[in-house]
Amino acid sequence: MVLWVPMQSRIWPPKPLPVGWTNTPVAEASGPLAKPAPSFTNAPDPASIPSLVPSNREPERLVTLTNGVARYTFTSHGGGLKSIDLLDYPETTASHRGGKAPSGTKRVATLNRHAPFPAMSLAPGGPWGDGVYRLSSTPTSLKAECALTNGLVITKEFQLLSNYLVGVTTRLENRSDRPIEAAKQEWITGTATPMTATDQAMSWGVLWYNGASVSDDVGASFFSSRGFACVPRVPPTEYRGGASNVVWVAAHNQFFVLAAMMKQPALATVTRQVELPRPSGDDALMMATNAATPQGYQASIEYPSTVLAPKQSQEHQLFLYAGPKEYQALARIGDQFGNNLDLVMNFGWYGPVSKTLLLGMNLLHHLFKLPYGWAVVMITVIIKLVFWPLTQASTRSMKRMQALQPQVKAIQDKYKDDPVKVQRKMMELWKEHKVSPMSGCLPMLIQIPVFFGFYKMITSAIELRGASFLWAADLSKPDTLFVIPGLSGIPFFGVPGVGLPFNLLPLIMGGSMLWQSHLTPPSPGMDPAQAKLMRYLPLLFLAGFYNLSAGLTLYWTVNNLLSVAQTKLIRATDATATPGSGLTTAGKKGK
């Protein structure tokens, strides 16, 4: 795990950027991002440089453009993107934990909704103020312009492109007859907000990429007032990262992302926690009355200050991707710009496993026209078949260990005053009969990366959003059939302010795990009380899985049922003796 990142860099070196793009740090780059040399001989006295005066507030003007897949709303207050509506994706799917979607609504998924500031606006305060921009547009483009009183003009040009992309050019131009010092600029690229009132707090945040690796997700845990082991702490006011190497920064939620991809890396990135308005109307019914104020995470990029000579300008270019977390689409864009944009999927350490499972699930869906629910079942069967020989060997080894249990007990009784000798004699016994106590754990250890890879894939794959299976209306959510009011206080299961959701798949999963645990022989030498506890350990899994997505619960349930079938099949074929052990199931020597 420690060597994975450097190994990736050697085995899969970063792809070269398209012509005209560079990963050269800003400090070393030539062109508009480098600090331009003033064309005058003597540097001006800073006191003689006019200050920037914010424009007076005027009524907000909105301009809406659309390209068929998205609707972009621009505002004159800040001259940026106020919101992006994704026309092919509904805001919520099927029923929620409350049993029904908000009544009478046909809202689509919206990015940057309720954010305090538009995307591609300059952060308020400081010398930039909160100017009002003049908007002019064509069917596929928009220009926003703001003239400050000192002769500096801020211009933004937006061009709608395909594949959820928007080209953005920002320009600072000195139209005066004297030099102007343009202060360090902080451009807000977007705010990560939840899609619905019941989204999990850990599902939205901010990521950024430095050309080699992606950052940790900056969100609820970073700004939490609870530290390690829930020890109280003073939460940070902001996150700051980058050293002239910010290639892209992405504000995301569970299934959608608003990412800014710079033509030349930005100086730094900043993330701040911002308050969002509380849900109203039907949305408020899905949120506990005592719940904390919703929080969003505002992502920004910084460019260094510069001195602009008369008639000189400074220009920055970037692309905005505002769309779904669809891995293959993101990978194509990442290849086009050479920036690994697919890392916004945030698969983490389990990236290779998650990508393989996602591509395999999509292949089954498209090749055999299987609904995604049945594709999950099929890929679970395939995984089980791949691990079948290993699991079979493990089960037989555990049966041999169980057959040796009387002899192990005799050794423990005989040498109970000498633990070292007990261990040596047990090792000799296992070696004589060619069994290993670790063989039973090996299949579980190998399947752990597959499980977590599947979990990471399930929780962010847009393909499963709205996909149904039997009674489960949406595989990306719990399969709630109905809600029992008045039981919201039950730990692990109840939803505060809503009630106790009745989720059937986790109950089936818990039953299948109990069945499997009763078929699995206990480890040799295990205390009877401990063995009994281990048999009912699956109930803890039930508590952990109860409110997770139906897709993940479906995978684990099918996996358990296949394990039960495999155990029974092996028992049927080895009913009299385990081959090669020379022992009957009663522990006596065979013929």
Image: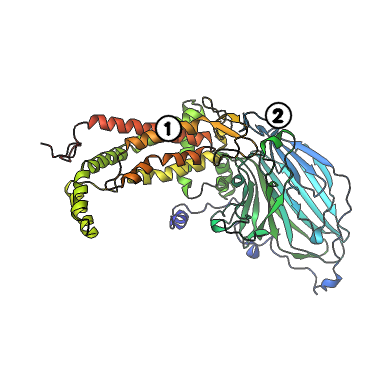
The image shows residue 172 at horizontal and vertical percentages of 78, 57
- Eyeballing the image, is 284 above or below 422? above
Q: Which residue is mark 1?
A: 511
Q: Residue at x 44, y 58 (%)?
A: 2
Q: Which residue is at the front of the view, 8 or 524?
A: 524
Q: Residue at x 26, y 32 (%)?
A: 571
Q: Which residue is mark 2?
A: 106
Q: Amino acid at mark 1?
A: Gly
Q: How many marks?
A: 2
Q: Nearer the viewer, mark 1 or mark 2?
A: 1
Q: Give the position of the N terminus as an image quadrant.
A: bottom left
Q: Count neighbours of disc 2 (C-alpha within 10 A) and say few if under 14, some if 14 to 19, many if 20 or more.
A: few
Q: Which mark is residue 473?
A: none
- Eyeballing the image, is 145 above or below 152? above
Residue 125 visible within the image: yes
What distance separates the C-alpha of mark 1 from that of mark 2? 38 Å
